[in-house]
Image: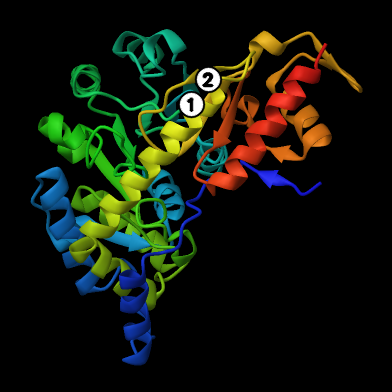
Amino acid sequence: MDVISLSLGEPTWKTPESICAAGIQAIKEGYTRYTPAGGSQKLKQAIIFYTKRWLGLNVTSAQVTASIGAKFILFSALQSLCNPDEEVLVPTPYWVSYPSMVELAQARMVPVPTYAKDNFRLQPDILKKHITERSKVLILNSPNNPSGAVLSKSDLISLGKVLMDHPQIYVLSDDIYNHLYFSGPMAPHILQLCPNLKDRILSINAASKNYSMPGWRLGWAVGNEELIGAMSKFQSQSVSCASSISQEAVAYALVQGDKELEAARHNLIKMKNLALDSFQKIKGLEVFPPEGAFYLWVNVKKLYSSSWKKGKINSSADFVEALFQEKAVLCVPGEEFNYPGYVRIHFAVDEQIWHSACNRIETFISSLS
């Protein structure tokens, strides 16, 4: 039986041809040398254009840096901001790489819980309870990986009011899925709604998800000059610069890739509707309807104490292991996101593969006793 992987964290559709053509043209024209550590001027101007258009924010070149993907941008931001034992507040469920990044910055991870009753949106009163004098960074990821939850305008305004009382806290806004939003061309952003906090907000983004360019490894950040300068120095002495070819392709995407961006979003909405329709028919599963990204966040607790041929299912990790062994369908247990009881399912796959995976999952659950 062939393995069906629903565990991926990347788009499965190709990079749009027009964006590829920009990269190919860069190669043909010999644009294959080093650039400044923080990115070429052409790329920075494209990011400035993008930031003004989508966030309504006027920034300068000194407030922009680019590097080898959003992951390294986030890593360099934490390295630049955190002193030993300072605290990084991270709402649960969260992306699997956050804890290691915080640890490598010698800071302390502070999980801040969210709940299904609140649609997995961070609540201001809960955030307030977890803030201490050691709190230095709050990471926001909306749309969220793994839940697909999106912070609304009112959510962000309420969180902003809490942060106004704690001027030592920087916000790292992980915007990697910001255009993969099902209710409009871009999810609400804290920079749009809390302008008084702009000097303490770092917007982190990349071409990986929105433009289906994960292998091109190009991410960027927009923030205050001091932080951006520190990050650029860190990058200069670690990874140097991002690929000059990728920079050219992303510069094109940010300025001229609207049609491709909207096509991807509409295609993803169709995939989401199909995924929800399929999973809501499977008994024993409770599915949180995603508001963005390309994951289903599935509660499997009703299946606890069920038996399969090698034992009982007493956790989401047990469910994932049993499903893989029995039906060769691979997904990610909630334990990886510090949220046991749930499973993350990647739905942005070929429709035929999706139907096959759903049939296997339904057959497996029906076999439990």
In contact (CB < 8 Å): disc 1 and disc 2: yes
Q: Residue at x 46, y 57 (%)?
A: 13
- The three-letter code of the residue at mark 2 reads Gln
Mark 1: give few (<14), some (14-19) or many (20+) Cα within 10 Å.
few
Q: Coloring scheme of the render? A: rainbow
- The image quadrant of residue 4 is top right
Residue 23: x and y in percent read 36, 77
Element marked by disc 1: helix
Front position in the image: 197 or 353: 353
Picture layout, residue 138 above or below residue 116 = below
Q: Quadrant of residue 190?
A: top left
Q: Say few, some or many: other residues with alpha carbon within 10 Å of mark 2 (under 14 / 14 to 19 / 20 or more).
A: some
Compared across the picture, whether 198 is left or right of 320 comes to: left
**Mark number displayed over residue 280:** 2
Q: CA distance from mark 1 to mark 2?
A: 6 Å
Residue at 23% across / 61% down in the picture?
254
- Dot 1 corresponds to which residue? 277
Q: Is residue 82 visible?
A: no
Instruction: Tell me if I can see residue 181 in this picture.
Output: yes
- Mark 2 residue element: loop
Residue sticking out furthest to the right: 310
